[in-house]
Amino acid sequence: GAVVSQHPSRVICKSGTSVKIECRSLDFQATTMFWYRQFPKKSLMLMATSNEGSKATYEQGVEKDKFLINHASLTLSTLTVTSAHPEDSSFYICSASPGTGLSDTQYFGPGTRLTVL
Amino acid sequence: AQSVTQPDIHITVSEGASLELRCNYSYGATPYLFWYVQSPGQGLQLLLKYFSGDTLVQGIKGFEAEFKRSQSSFNLRKPSVHWSDAAEYFCAVGAGYSSASKIIFGSGTRLSIRP
């Protein structure tokens, strides 16, 4: 089956620094990628939708200047948390879609645990 | 707007017993519905999905779900649970009719298995 990887799997950073998380589709080209955030014992909250070669579409309430998304190729999307603060600590999950067909499905990465000290 | 409700936060069942996890959705048209499972420290795995056709959908790991339009429900069932089924289960609805549409998740139901 299709595989989506995320790197790093976990990261600890100091408050005020920026952190980049990568999401890669390993064996398919992903025209669309999604970024989710999951708080402890909570559901996944969609942050943004990114299409290759165009600007990401952010959900209401998500700061686009704080959570920078780049989808520069059909196999890679990055999420950069700028000037991270402890409240940004969370589990970030990406998903990738190979196309627009009904038989297609989104494939989820294993997630990245971010801890901001 | 689309939404998903999972009324049960935590369920405990005995190993070998049957299981039903509830899910209700809100959507203006025929929904694109999913059930995902998340094990501790793992990513999300798709158990099954429904778009059209037979309202009883078979998934992986012995799970099935039934779409009931009249009740706006898509409950997940398994006839006999195994200890390895302990995990977090998420019901979700697609905001459109393609895999490139965003998915809206319910709050999740944590399943514990009693030996």
Image: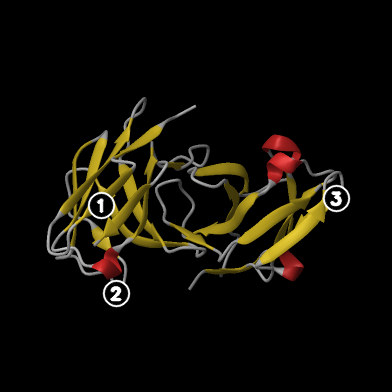
Q: Which residue is mark 3?
A: B18
- Callout 1: SS: strand
The disc numbered 3 marks a residue on which chain? B
Amino acid type at mark 1: Ile
Please state the horizontal and vertical placement of residue B47, each as a whole percent of the image: 63, 43
Specify whether residue B26 is in view: no
Q: Which residue is mark 1?
A: A12
Amino acid type at mark 3: Ser
Q: Which residue is mark 2?
A: A61
Residue B52 lies left or right of residue B43; in this view the side is right
Q: Residue at x 36, y 25 (%)?
A: A27
CB under 8 Å between discs 3 and 2: no
Between B33 and A35, the one lying in front of the other is A35
Q: Looking at the image, is mark 2 or mark 1 earlier in the sequence?
A: 1
* Quarter occupied by residue A18: bottom left
- Give neighbour class at mark 2: few <14, some 14-19, many 20+ (Cα, 10 Å): few
Between A32 and A87, the one lying in front of the other is A87
Q: Nearer the viewer, mark 2 or mark 1?
A: 1
- Callout 3: SS: loop
Q: Nearer the viewer, mark 3 or mark 2?
A: 3
CB under 8 Å between discs 2 and 1: no
